[in-house]
Image: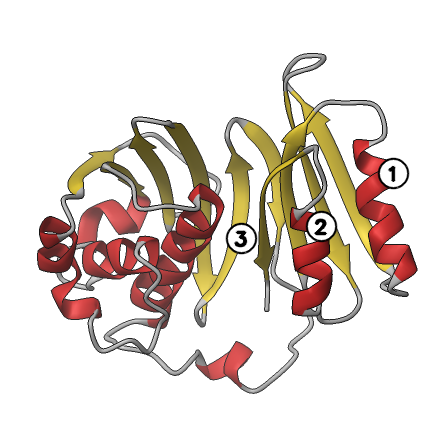
Amino acid sequence: MKYRSVFDIIGPVMVGPSSSHTAGAARIGLMAGKLFGRTPRTAHITFYGSFADTYRGHGTDVAIVGGIMGFDTFDLRIPQALDIASEKGIEVIFETSDLLTDHPNTARVLLEDELGTFEIVGVSIGGGTIEITELNGFPLKLTGGGPALVVLHHDRFGAIAAVTGVLANHQLNIGHMEVSRHEKGMQALMAIEIDETIPADVLAELERLPQIERIAIFGE
């Protein structure tokens, strides 16, 4: 793995105690919350491996719930995240599993409200760095090695071309791209790693495309 800054080695500015079990969990929750795009009614969180063994003592529970509500790793509200979630009317359900996973620090987050559900699987690989390995049943591998767009969209003719066209018009170079779908004409996924930071006006332009359901930036 290439390190972009000293924080990739020593970990981010954070509410502790652990960069892998606390900061990493917060970032998994942040990604889930960004892509869900609204306050969930229910957050069902499953911990695997060492997350399952130590999530209470290492603050993994409060960190991941804080992330879902938009709290970054350094947000001083993280220790009170469960109480804040309750005040917001979010039902939080924790579950542990002894199923073997590729990495011991793995969490599955299922968010739900009256409009639908959203599910993400994330891995905390150390120093606050995470990987996203599954999104709404789509397998993928986003490492956070650089900025990436995660785009959920309708599987329609021209959707991929519309997104890549916007990036090309703004001279943003694509380093790697994954596309997948469950069924023809249903929900589909684009995961696009980009060489440069994605400006806010470009993100807004992408969000206005008619085929797009949700967009989030990963790795910035």
Name the residue at 72% across, 42% down.
Answer: 209
Toward the top, the furthest residue is 184
Residue 123 point in image, percent of width and height: 45, 50
Label placed on residue 103: none
Foreground pick, 52 / 177? 177
Mark 3 belongs to which amino acid?
Glu
Q: In this view, does 217 lie to the left or right of 85?
A: right
- The residue carrying mark 1 is 161
Is disc 2 surrounded by few (<14), some (14 to 19) or many (20+) residues within 10 Å?
A: many
Question: Amino acid type of disc 1?
Answer: Ala
Task: Give the x, y percent position of residue 56.
Answer: 14, 56
Determine the image quadrant of residue 94: top left
Q: Which residue is drawn at the image coordinates 42% and 47% (left, top)?
A: 32
Query: Could you tell me how far apart the alpha carbons at marks 3 and 2 are, in whole angstroms?
Result: 24 Å
Which residue bears the numbered disc 2?
A: 206
Left or right, 66 with respect to 166, comes to: left
Amino acid type at circle 2 is Leu
Q: Residue at the spot x=90%, y=65% of the render?
A: 171
Sequence-earlier tag: 3 or 2: 3
Tell me whether circle 1 and circle 2 mark residues in contact (CB < 8 Å). no
Looking at the rendering, in which quadrant would you find the N terminus? Answer: bottom right
The residue that mark 3 highlights is: 131
